[in-house]
Amino acid sequence: NEPHEGLRKNESQWPIHQINWQKSRYIYDMYYTFKKISKEVYDYCITNKIADAALIAKWKRPGYERLCSTYVVNPRNYKFGTVSICRVPKQFLTPGTEIEDPTTGCRGCASGSGENIFGSKYGQYLAAIQIARENRQAMKLAKEEAEKDDDEDEDNNESGDEEKEPDGESTYKGPVGAADGSSG
């Protein structure tokens, strides 16, 4: 429980919108972007309302790939029948304009750069972070396995001085020449 003293009434509800976004984005990315979960798991999450189906449906449409909440695109929620300021692309705003939706805390979810739309821990793309960690772990294991194989190859080469007799027993013949290159 984060303290809410000193926050505006709407600010205390920002984590609700942001956690909903993060949860839905994780499921969306794992299914559509990275194909790491099955259709059955995805459908289970949608039918049991673990993920926001309306928000995911919006993300599939061009221009809504980074949408923070379905609340911000509903014209009934804003004066003059418009949408939230967070939906305005930054290039159309005057320089230095600070964007922050009063309801969700979004700092700009119009399509564009892939920066954190909430400016907090809730705006991270957790699926991408998890996939990067898994890839890094797989590379680390592959590197360790390659080093282990190299060590085994070196061990086999060191014991390669032995020659096997036809009956299968090995006899050590020793070094071929002296270190100075002479034969004895």
Image (spheres, grey):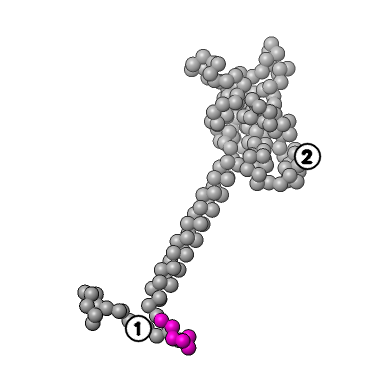
- Residue at image position (48%, 17%) is 96
- Residue at image position (76%, 43%) is 44
Q: Observer-nearest residue: 146 or 25? A: 146
The quarter in which the N terminus is drawn is: top right
Assign a secondary structure to mark 2: helix
Which of discs 1 and 2 lies nearer the camera? The answer is 1
Residue 11 visible in the displayed image? no
- Residue at image position (75%, 39%) is 46
Give the numbered dot on residue 173. Answer: 1
Indicate the position of residue 178 as horizontal and vertical percent values: 24, 78
Count of numbered labels shown in the rendering = 2
Q: Magenta region's main secondary structure?
A: loop
**Magenta residue check for 165:** yes
Give the numbered dot on residue 103. Answer: none
Indicate the position of residue 165 as horizontal and vertical percent values: 44, 86
Assign a secondary structure to mark 1: loop
Q: Is residue 21 left or right of residue 177?
A: right
Residue 129 visible in the displayed image? yes
Indicate the position of residue 141 as horizontal and vertical percent values: 51, 57
Q: Dot 2: within a 10 Å radius of its alpha carbon, few (fewer than 14), some, or many (20 or more) residues? A: few
Q: What kind of residue is marked 1? A: Lys
Indicate the position of residue 3 as horizontal and vertical percent values: 59, 32
Q: Observer-nearest residue: 122 or 82? A: 82
Q: Which residue is mark 2?
A: 47
- Real-space CA distance between mark 1 and mark 2, rounded to the nearest whole angstrom: 74 Å
In the image, farthest residue toward the bottom = 167
The span picked out in magenta is: 163-168
Q: What kind of residue is marked 2? A: Thr
